[in-house]
Image: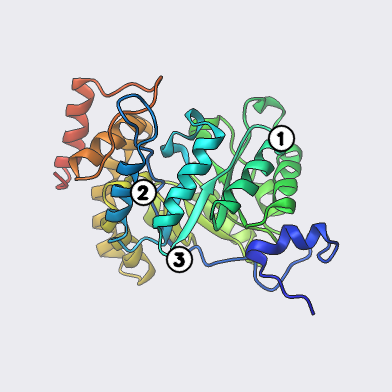
Amino acid sequence: MLCVPVRRGAGLLRRAGLLSAWTRPQSRGPDLSGIYPPIATPFTPGEDVDYRKLEGNLRKYAEIPFRGLVVQGSNGEYPYLTEEERVEVVETVRRSLPKDKLLMAGSGCESTRATLRLTEKMAAAGADLALVVTPCFYKGKMDGAALIQHFTKVADGSPVPVVLYSVPANTGLELPLDAVVRLSQHPNILGLKDSGGDISRIGLIVHRTSTQDFQVLAGSAGFLMAAYSVGAVGGVCALANVLGRELCELASLCVSGRWEEARGLQQRLIEPNAAVTRKLGVPALKQAMDWFGLHGGACRSPLQPLSEAEAQQLRRDFSSNGWL
């Protein structure tokens, strides 16, 4: 009997004719439970990727009980990196990351063909999982049928399990619930990162995929506790780049059912999280990283640094909640 681990073999088996379309293997991949920072990409003053500063950040993250790292997510400024840079960043992280920590690499592109090609390159670079964002440039045509076809083709050919990524604040497009439910049945689609913040939707996704081996991750620290309460298994949280230990503590409180303690901590994280996400974005995240002893630095153009007023607001959002 041929035995190939599904986490790296589903696409290969299917292409070899040994795994029929949408046949469920016994296990689809690793347990995603836990917290992941979607790491920032440091740049030199000349806007080249600063691999030395990146490695410095990775050494500090190694001291925090993260489940793994997300590389080339929205906070990594992936739309501004070349394909070669995106792959090289993943290779750099894999060299530094302990084998028991998961590396989830963003491989989404606008076309299905380009997404599959980059997914294969990310797997070869050492990614354990591919995080695939919804294509959105022609969002008026990206209905459920188009997105199901896109993600199915990517998952069919991917050497590693796929995690769906819905981030409507950036794409203007939410992955339809019915599409998520249909895709949850695919043997090489392991879960969903949902950044929309609609807790009723997250709870309904968990409920409607309960018969599948499908895992949901909250896409923001602002609703992490709420997401855990309706069945999410963890979170990919921008704020974890800055307050990683605190996010891991919140996750631990939720998992152990210590909801009163969790509520107090969650409330103190809402304002700083909003500041580094929807309110001020990646420049604020990088500024906060500098304040907390990591290297954030400048963004790649055309993203601009914070104004003085924005930096003052960011500091108030952290200090008024006891973090600075």
Q: Residue drawn at (60%, 39%), measured in percent from left and top?
A: 108
Q: Are marks 1 and 3 in contact (CB under 8 Å)?
A: no
How far from the left and from the top, in percent, is residue 188? 68, 59
Amino acid under label 3? Answer: Lys
Looking at the rendered structure, the kind of residue marked 2 is Ala
Gap in angstroms between the C-alphas marked 3 and 2: 26 Å
Q: Quadrant of residue 98?
A: bottom left
Circle 1: residue type: Asp
Q: Quadrant of residue 24?
A: bottom right
Q: Position of residue 3 (x, y in %)?
A: 73, 75
Q: Is residue 37 visible?
A: yes
Q: Are marks 2 and 1 in contact (CB under 8 Å)?
A: no
The answer, for residue 197, to whether it is visible in the render is no
Say few, some or many: other residues with alpha carbon within 10 Å of mark 3 (under 14 / 14 to 19 / 20 or more): few
- Label at residue 221: 2
Of callouts 2 and 1, the N-terminal one: 1
Name the residue located 72 percent from the left edge and 62 percent from the top edge. 10
User: In the picture, which quadrant includes the C terminus?
Assistant: top left
* Distance of label 1 from label 3 (alpha carbons): 38 Å
The N terminus lies in quadrant: bottom right
Q: Which of the two discs, 1 and 3, labels the residue nearer the N terminus?
A: 3
In this rendering, the label closer to the viewer, 1 or 3:
3
Taking the view exactly as shown, the residue that stands out farthest to the bottom is 1
Q: Residues within 10 Å of mark 1 (few under 14, many from 20)?
A: some
Q: Is residue 276 left or right of residue 310?
A: right
Frontmost residue, 93 versus 192: 93
Label placed on residue 99: 3
